[in-house]
Image: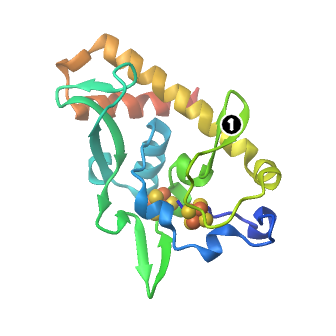
């Protein structure tokens, strides 16, 4: 989840180095990237690609948050190949995200997230050096707040779907329902 910023200098670490520079994007290789409604919408419209082409389903761990569809109780994530995220590209040992403009919110936020308005660093992070927390917050606070609210929006959509349809409809129907909700929210 290489953090790409407009001005990398503004997010240097305490040691003065931008962490992603000395890293081989381990985060993009190791993690399953779970996505929300806005992430799917941005990737789908930005790439002109049907969601099923880049999504993979995982069995949901949390019954109250998982999507109930004919296929089971599931969560949505980006497809992976042997080298990690399908959107990660390697050229001569240099790794880059090929969907930088539409990458999921969590990819931009890593290794931080916002909970109830508070910035928190995830545990067991893969970054080779420490980030400067204050600099990161200054640079990313608006994105982190937006990411938090998009996840809340997604949780509400999933709850509504589960109550209305339960396991009676397919994943394809859920995706249509979800993308229509995002579109509506963007026009209202
Ligand atoms: S979408 Fe891009 S940044 Fe996110 S995991 Fe995939 S390659 Fe990395
Ligand atoms: S693991 Fe950390 S330092 Fe490495 S690419 Fe990902 S965000 Fe950057």
Residue 2 in sight from this viewpoint: no
Instruction: Find residue 29 and report its image quarter.
Output: bottom left
Instruction: Classify 186 as above or below 122.
Output: above
Callout 1 secondary element = helix
Q: Please tell me how crowded label 1 is: few (under 14), some (14-19), or many (20+) other residues with Cα within 10 Å.
A: some
- Residue 107 in view: yes
**Residue 173: image x %, image y %?**
25, 29
Q: Is residue 157 above or below residue 21?
A: above
**Left or right of 26 on screen, residue 111:** right
* Front-most of residues 127 and 169: 127
Q: Which residue is mark 1?
A: 145
In terms of depth relative to the viewer, which is nearer, 114 or 40?
114
Residue at 67 percent of width and 68 percent of height: 19
117 above or below 3? above
| Mark 1 CB within 8 Å of ligand 2 | no
Q: How is the image coloured?
A: rainbow
Asked whether, in this view, residue 182 is left or right of residue 138, the answer is left
Spot the residue most to the bottom.
92
Apparent side of residue 67 relative to residue 120 in the rendered image (left or right): left
Q: Residue furthest top?
A: 163
Q: Quadrant of the C terminus?
A: top right
Figure quadrant of residue 13: bottom right
Q: How many numbered discs, if any?
A: 1
Residue at the spot 35% in from the left edge and 40% down from the top edge? 76
Where residue 159 sits: x, y (%)? Answer: 40, 17
Q: On the rendered structure, is 13 left or right of 66? A: right
On the image, the x and y values in percent for residue 64 come to 38, 19
Q: Quadrant of ligand 2?
A: bottom right
Image coords of residue 7 (percent x, y): 76, 67
């Amino acid at each position: 989840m290489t953090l790409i910023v407009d001005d990398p200098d503004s997010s240097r670490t305490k040691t003065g180095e931008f962490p992603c520079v000395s890293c081989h994007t381990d985060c993009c290789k190791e993690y399953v990237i779970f996505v929300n409604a806005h992430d799917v919408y941005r990737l789908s419209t930005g790439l002109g690609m049907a969601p099923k082409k880049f999504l993979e389903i995982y069995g949901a761990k949390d019954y109250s948050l998982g999507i109930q569809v004919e296929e089971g109780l599931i969560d949505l994530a980006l497809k992976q190949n042997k080298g990690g995220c399908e959107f990660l590209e390697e050229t001569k040992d240099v790794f880059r995200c090929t969907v930088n403009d539409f990458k999921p919110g969590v990819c931009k936020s890593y290794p931080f997230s916002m909970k109830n308005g508070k910035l928190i660093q995830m545990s067991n992070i893969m970054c080779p050096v420490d980030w400067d927390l204050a600099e990161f917050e200054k640079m990313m606070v608006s994105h982190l707040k937006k990411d938090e609210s998009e996840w809340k929006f997604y949780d509400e959509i999933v709850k509504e779907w589960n109550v209305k349809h339960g396991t009676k409809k397919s994943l394809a129907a859920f995706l249509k329902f979800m993308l229509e909700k995002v579109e509506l929210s963007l026009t209202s």
